[in-house]
Image (cartoon, rainbow, N blue to C red):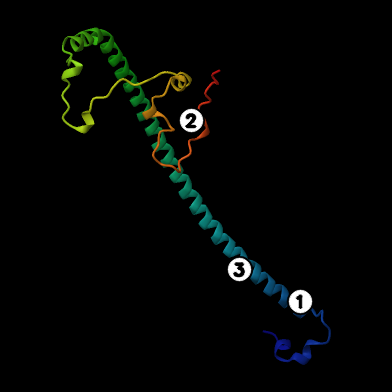
C-alpha cells in the first residue's frame, strides 16, 4: 500500500491516472490467473476421464475379441454336428423309415376309439375351389336363406342369381 491510497487527495485529478491503471491491470491479472488455474484443474479432470474411458474401451475390445473367438469356435462345432447329423440321417434314414412302416398302427375307421371330445372323429374336408363349391346346389339346411330370424338379411355375395327358366 502506498501513501496515495491512504490520502485520496494526493492521487490527482483525471480518469486515466497511471496508479489506477496499474491497479486495474493487477486485478485483471489476478482474475486471469484464477481462471487459468481453474482451467488447469478442469483439464486435469477431463484427462482423467479420458484415461478411464480409454481403459474401459481397451477392456471392452478384449472382451469382444474373446467373444468373437468363442463364437467362431461354436460355429465350427455347430457345423461339425450338422455334418454328423446329415451323415447319420443318410446312413440310418431308410432303416428308420422301414422300422416305422413295419411298426405302424392301423385302425379301421369304424373301430376308432374316441375317449374325449378332443378325439372326436371328423369327416373328410371339402377342398374344392371356392367357385366350384358355391356353384353346387345348396341343400336347404345349408342355405344362407334358411334362417328363423325375420330381421336377418343375407349379404349380397350369398344370394345367387338364379337363371331365368322359360
Question: Is residue 63 toward the left or the right of residue 9 in the image?
Answer: left
Label at residue 21? 1
Residue 155: x, y in percent? 50, 35
Q: 6 or 108: which is nearer to us?
A: 108
Q: Nearer the viewer, mark 1 or mark 2?
A: 2
Q: Which of marks 3 and 2 is in front?
A: 2
Q: Answer yes or no: do the residues labelled 3 and 2 have beta carbons within 8 Å? A: no
The residue that label 2 is drawn on is: 158
Q: Name the residue under label 3.
A: 34
Within-10-Å neighbours for mark 1: few <14, some 14–19, many 20+: few
Q: How far apart are marks 3 and 2 (CA)?
A: 91 Å
The quadrant of the picture occupied by the N terminus is bottom right
Give the alpha-carbon distance from disc 3 to disc 1, as whole Å: 20 Å
Q: Using residue 3 as the reference point, say whether residue 102 is left or right of it.
A: left
Quadrant hosting residue 117: top left
Q: Where does the image place residue 154, in percent across and percent down from the top left? A: 48, 36
Judge the density around disc 2: few (<14), some (14-19), many (≥20) Cα neighbours within 10 Å.
Answer: few
Q: Are marks 1 and 2 in contact (CB under 8 Å)?
A: no
Q: Which residue is drawn at the image coordinates 76% and 80% (left, top)?
A: 19
The C terminus lies in which quarter of the figure?
A: top right
Position above or below: 89 against 68: above
First in sequence: mark 3 or mark 2? 3
Label 3 close to label 1 by CB (< 8 Å): no
Identify which residue is drawn at 48% across, 30% down. Answer: 158
**39 above or below 89?**
below
Q: Tell whether 152 sits left or right of 73.
A: right
- The numbered mark at residue 150 is none
Q: What element carries label 2?
A: helix
Q: In this view, does 100 lie to the left or right of 84?
A: left
Amino acid at each position: 500500500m502506498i501513501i496515495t491510497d491512504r490520502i485520496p487527495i494526493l492521487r490527482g485529478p483525471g480518469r486515466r491516472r497511471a496508479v489506477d491503471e496499474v491497479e486495474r491491470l493487477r486485478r485483471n491479472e489476478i482474475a486471469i490467473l484464477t481462471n487459468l488455474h481453474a482451467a488447469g484443474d478442469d483439464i486435469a479432470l477431463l484427462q482423467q476421464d479420458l484415461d478411464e474411458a480409454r481403459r474401459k474401451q481397451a477392456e471392452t475390445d478384449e472382451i469382444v475379441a474373446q467373444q468373437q473367438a468363442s463364437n467362431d469356435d461354436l460355429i465350427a462345432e455347430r457345423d461339425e454336428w450338422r455334418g454328423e447329423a446329415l451323415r447319420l440321417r443318410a446312413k440310418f434314414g431308410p432303416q428308420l423309415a422301414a422300422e416305422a412302416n413295419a411298426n405302424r398302427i392301423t385302425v379301421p375307421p369304424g373301430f376308432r376309439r374316441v375317449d374325449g371330445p378332443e378325439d372326436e372323429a371328423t369327416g373328410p374336408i371339402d377342398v374344392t375351389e371356392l367357385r366350384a363349391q358355391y356353384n353346387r346346389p345348396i341343400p336347404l339346411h345349408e342355405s344362407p336363406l334358411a334362417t328363423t330370424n325375420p330381421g336377418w338379411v343375407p349379404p349380397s355375395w350369398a344370394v345367387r342369381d338364379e337363371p331365368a327358366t322359360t
